[in-house]
Image (cartoon, coloured by chain):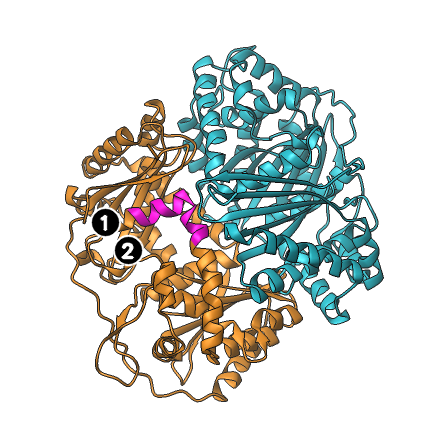
Chain colours: A cyan, B orange
Amino acid sequence: MTELKEYQYAENGYQLHIIPTKKFKTNMIMVRFLSPLRRENATKRALLPFVLQKGTKEFPSERLLRIKLDELYGAQLSVDSSKKGENLLITLRISFVNEKFIQNNTSLLTEVLHLLRQILLEPNGTEHAFLPELVAKEKNTLRQKIESIKDQKMQYANMRLIDEMCKGEPYETHVHGYLEDLDSVNENNLYDEFIAMIQHDQMDVYALGDLHVEKTKEAIGKVLTFSREPKHESPLSNHRVHIDEVKEIKEAQKIQQGKLQIGFRTNTTFKDDDYFALQIYNGLFGGFPHSKLFMNVREKHQLAYYAASRFESHKGLLLVFSGIAPQSFDKAKEIILEQVEEMKKGNFTEEQLEETKRLTVHQLKETLDNPYGIVELMYHQVLAEKNMSPEEMFAALEKVTKNDLIALAEKIELDTIYFLTSEGDQ
Amino acid sequence: MKSFQLEQIGETLYHKKLENGLDVFLLPRMEMEKTYGIFSTKYGSIDQTFTPIGQSDYTTVPDGIAHFLEHKLFEKEDGDVFQQFSKQGASANAYTSFTRTSYLFSSTENVKENVQTLLDFVQEPYFTEETVEKEKGIIGQEIKMYDDQPDWRLFFGTIGSLYHHHPVKIDIAGTVESIQQITKDDLYTCYETFYHPSNMILLITGSFDPETMLQDVEDNQRKKSFRPADNIQRSFPDEPVSVAEKEREIRMPVSTSKCLVGIKQNPAQLTSDHIPKLKLVTQMVYDFFFSRSGEYYEELYREGLIEDEFDYEIHIENNFGFSMIGGDSTKPKELSARLREMLLQLKQEEISDENFERMKRKKQGDLIRTLNSLEATANQFIDYHQLGLNYFDVYETLNTMTKDDFSSILAEWIKEEQISTCYVLPES
């Protein structure tokens, strides 16, 4: 395995991470802002990525900005917002081809960094505001996007489960924002939010690729020069939630297939020693085709095409999702909950445990074949304030025992069952 | 084994056609953790009417059978092949498209065993009445899942409006009704006909030694016997150049309207010497005018006709081709009208040297970027191989492309009769 080394530097107001690797044909720069997740500014934060891509002072329209990127051999720019644990992230990525593969002498890195500075420090607008017509238009775009979530049934059902399960917790916040908050957003207060992000968010910059560490550090240092005063709020993680009673919610729409979503609390996050046991647990329970969910819900009872689980690393959730016929609800629920009990009883073989470890390690290694995958893996450490190299992660996965899994299974608590069903089947 | 230096990207590709007719391609990428293997047959949802191996009369099989067969190949007398891959630390999958069925794995260990498993499970079918019946429930849910997805309905709705008879209009998974008719004998008929090694390709890319890998594959294949290869006869209905319906509406319980404009490719242009340029030019044209750096995109955005979800896709195969462009819109009818105008206007557009250079640069960057992903590289390679082409020639095709090549394709591309629109609109 190629060893990945991450060089870290505390720069003025941000943390710089440089990961040199010759694995890829492209290089990439990522800038990530982190702030606590909360309803009050969620809509503005959802809107920012749209507005920021619409141009800068030097390239004052989306088209001019994109033409510039095209000229740089199709450099790719993306800006998005997401949540990890109870944190809101705004992420800007630019990936560009390694100059080695093109007959051109210009330094793409220099050009890309210049663009990055433009987007972050010279956005399209006046001194205190974005352009009003642009903000108005992008509010419409966001409105449309929020409304269309209802049309993507899997995504909608997942959102609804979290709404119900995490009611009253910061994690319930919709990272795509709220229709009813859109009206109050304008070019001025959106700009203020942007400045707050630039000034006060925790900020991390990653550079990954065929890069010379010292030269890259210098080049980035020259461009990202601004005085920041990050507020030193620790990234938020889970706080233990007491479950009084399991919630069961059914909602009906005009659909063909029901979406069953079940949420559990794992009471384990990336920080914890048993986090690696959780990864194996998830694999055995619902993460792989040999898992209990796939084998029972799909193969044995043929109730679904998909039946799987995934976990949230920083909030401590385990989420089961399956598409079933509306009339199969009771049976599917029963089978899924049975599998949870089977895990508690340790009803799996050593061989299955070993298989799951092999596949989990494989999955993690596979992540290292993708530039974004590497950076995301590294960023877990920022969120959890815990340093761990990929090699240490592999070792920790290998060490998980059957007893670890049984102990972990005891911590897993059923919280909410959500079913999106068809009208008339309720 | 022949080797080809891919100088521009610093890689080497190896090829051998085995005695049984199987094309084996190896693309080592020693810097990667994993190895990705894909075993693919030229058999997809459009291959509905054909002469079964050893017979001379045409037969027509139920809709969705290629996809059904794909599901069933994973099941064996002693269990599920997924489990076998799991034991060997590999993840496996498969997919069926219009023209091919592909089986794949990726693994970071036991690569040799996983290649054997891939070859063996695809080449040793085990179909029984009982297991065939069992799968109908699972695939039924897969179909229903797609039925609830407006984008999928829109995609097939658009194809349906483009084609009168061609089986590309049939949903790849078939329908809940059509799959009920599938029997184990149907599966064997299709299997015997289309899964002959001479109709297949094996591509392995990742971290391995090519000499040893080829030896392992050859040893595996030598142990198996196959009937002599037969020339597969497929039959396709005559399909007019013009579209079947100019407009089609699908009513669904959606909150956002959608519009997709389809352009049917004139099959006369789908010759193997023309396809390499046609594919590139089509991609470059859409990108130049309709991506976010495009003049037309900017107009549509300014006119308030498009939202964040706006995209295009291109399918070019040997006997059919089409492209589609559209997305979410609050004014779907106006969007359709403007897109039609723009598409017809394209042939009059003058491209400056500077713009042509920019287009080529961007495409060059895209092609290099594809190599970051083993999956994307392998899929592109197989796509081209299906058309009788070598994907890696694409760099040279792009380098040598002139503005005249570009303009001549643009001039011939679209006529009004080849355009249709499909909408997904809210009920009532």
Which residue sits at x=45%, y=77%?
Answer: B129
- Residue A116: x and y in percent read 56, 30
Q: Could you say which quadrant of the image residue B387 lies in?
A: bottom left
Q: Which residue is mark 1?
A: B162
- Residue A203: x and y in percent read 69, 30
Q: Main secondary structure of the magenta part?
A: helix
Residue A31 visible: yes
Residue stretch in magenta: B144-157
Tag 1 and tag 2, C-beta contact below 8 Å: yes
Foreground of the two, A54 or B323: B323
Q: Is residue A312 magenta?
A: no
Residue B100 visible: no
Q: Chain of mark 2?
A: B
Q: Earlier in the sequence, mark 1 or mark 2?
A: 1
- Residue A224: x and y in percent read 64, 27
Q: Is residue B199 left or right of residue B50?
A: right
